[in-house]
Image: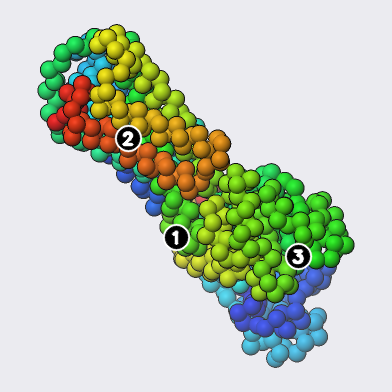
Amino acid sequence: MEFVIIVTIFFYLMSTAGYFAYLFLQKNYLNRVGYFLLIAGFLCNSAAIFYGFLKSGHIPVHNLHETLVIVGWSIAGVFIIFQYKFNLRILGIYAAPLATIVMVFASQVSSEPAQIKNIVNNCWLIFHIISIFIGEAFFILAGGLGFMYLAQEHAIKAKKHGFFFRRLPSLELLDTAGYTCIVVGFTMLTIGLATGLVYAKMVWGKFWGWDPKEVWSCITWLLYAALLHERLTAGWRGRKAAIMAIIGLAVLLFTFFGVNFFLKGHHGEFTRL
Amino acid sequence: MFDIVLLGLNHKTAPVALRELLAFSKEEAVTVLQNLQKCPDMNEVMLISTCNRVEVLLTTSNTINAVNSVKTYISEFKKIPISQFESALYVHDGEEAVRHIFRVASSLDSMMIGEPQILGQIKDAYLTAILKKTSGVILNRLLHKTFFVAKRVRTETGIGDHAVSISYAAIELARKIFGDLEGKKVLLVGAGEMAELAVEHLIRNRVGEVFVANRTFERGVELSNRFKGKAIRIEEIPDCLKVVDIIISSTGSPNFVIVRDQVKGVMRSRRNRPIFFIDIAVPRDIDPDINRLNNSYVYDIDDLKGVIEENIKDRNKESIKGERIVDEAVISFRQWYESLGAVPTIVALRNKIDTIARTEVDKTLQSLNHLADNDRQAIYRMTNSLINKIMHDPTLFLKNNGCHGDRVTYIDLTRKLFKLDD
């Protein structure tokens, strides 16, 4: 298990190197190398998760270590699909190092499973976990695209056409890609929350328990819902949409880490150090 | 052995007044080629004449005579005394001539580094030389190598990247904002060469409808017909801003034609779709404060000039890589050129036959174990004299004057026939 994680980190690291080399040298084969290394890492990552699944019999999200492994897996997986669809190569310098950092972090925290009470393993739980993680990975990409949009917009407005201006794609593409990520992420988050509610009803007998994680997830959901609503009605796009995607990312990170570290709740066991 | 010589003048050595006196039209070039070839000591010749350069590339057995006869001929043909253009002339021979033609074709020697036309002009000049049969083995090889080098420089360096003219720079910026320009609507305010050129570039990028607003409506109609667009009145501009994406403005108006509040007012009904103003006019037509609004971008003529300057700096940086590619190519051409001497070819031919004979004899002797050492030596001796006999006539032919002065052709043929250049 440890070994597979190390191999995964190695692949992600090499992929990061590939993408950065592409950033500086702008040779297409470097981009492809980065992409294939990321896929190799993703496969190893999947193997690690599958192994955890075989060992425990349910999705391995019982401590921070396992959860982070899934986070890294979702970021890599979602980016692979994303790059296949949009061919937005420069995003590799954001996604690949992020997956690497998450995996390094995962390998450093204890992998002792937490003592869990009241876990019922059923398909609702699997759906809940998988769709939440994939949705979050899309939001993470949307946040990265938001940063890129702001950088590119600043270059165009300030008329300073430097290193990144040449390498970043058009504003339109960044905006569309970010929007797509948020739509998909929002859909996944909605499915994740809904299945979570059903699961809560089955296991604890009530849909809503005012658990801090539930509350903050709901806040995240409302935030992205507001962003989508404004885009569809008032045409919120470009700069405002990019800033909202970044704020959304910040709230998301707080929901994921902050709530567990600072507040108590029934998700806490899975992500506490 | 022939020498490759290039003589000529370009924008660096001669003012335009002199260049236009010496420029040759296509028809003139044909006559010049045919007459130059008749000069004594002249072997192969081609003529490159563009607005920035006039160059004669030739191979000769006597450089000084050939250069002089070209000078005299040009002076007679154009009726200009030699003294008037001699100081502007440069003469390169051997490796320097090769390097020069490589650099010219790769656009490293152009007035605007990286401009793409020069390669096509050299291709045309070469085609004329081929049709008039004034190019031969050496120039053919040299020019093919030249085209190869030029292509390599273009694809492997950024020498041709990024716009260096105002209208192209504007299009490039529009691409950075909109990505694809297909279907984007354009508004041209006023008229002017640069603005019209920009609209033409946009149309080539398959933009959608083109609107034209002009102070005199008739002129607007005239222009809109040219762009297959629609003429509107100046008063209609604010309404038009609701639909168009790219505005190119070039009027003589002393005041702003479009002000901030007009754009601010339409952003809501545009649903915040980006809008890009290209202001070519002096004094400016577009309120620069519009650039501060969300999703709207303004570039005036100075901004565009700034972009171009950056791009030119980049091209100059990239040209260093281009020079390296040229250097490599000069070395590999020299290797081929040196192999054209009679001696290296004869040696290569002998080595080839020698290797074949030895391999075959060794193979045969392996199965003839009953032979004594003496017998084996005799077979080797016989092989050697066979080789000598075979080599005798070709050696004489290539070394002496058997080739009637056209030795390079025969050496090249020999090398191809026996595949001596791997």
Give me the C-alpha separation between circle 1 and circle 2: 32 Å
Residue that numbered label 3 is attached to? B190
At x 41%, y 23%, the residue is A190
Q: Amino acid at mark 1?
A: Gly
Quadrant containing the C terminus of chain A in the rendered view? top left
Residue that numbered label 1 is attached to? A162
Q: Amino acid at mark 2?
A: Leu
Judge left or right: residue B285 versus residue B344: right
Residue that numbered label 2 is attached to? A252
**Visible in this render: residue B336?**
no
Give me the C-alpha separation between circle 2 and circle 3: 51 Å
User: Looking at the picture, does residue A189 appear above or below residue B199?
Assistant: above
Q: Nearer the viewer, residue B318 or B31?
A: B318
Q: Nearer the viewer, residue A192 or B300?
A: A192
Dot 1, crowdedness within 10 Å: few (<14), some or many (≥20)?
Answer: few
Q: Quadrant of residue B219?
A: bottom right
Q: Are marks 1 and 2 on the same chain?
A: yes
User: Looking at the picture, does residue A163 appear above or below residue A92?
Assistant: below
Quadrant containing the N terminus of chain A in the rendered view? top left
Q: Nearer the viewer, mark 3 or mark 1?
A: 3
Circles 2 and 3 in contact, beta carbons < 8 Å: no
Give me the C-alpha separation between circle 3 and circle 1: 32 Å
Judge left or right: residue A54 versus residue B75: left
Q: Nearer the viewer, residue B302 or A84?
A: B302
Dot 3, crowdedness within 10 Å: few (<14), some or many (≥20)?
Answer: many
- Any mark on residue B420, and which? none
Judge left or right: residue A156 versus residue A113: right
At x 72%, y 72%, the residue is B253
Q: Amino acid at mark 3?
A: Gly
Circles 1 and 2 in contact, beta carbons < 8 Å: no
- The percent coordinates of residue B272 (x first, y second) are 57, 46
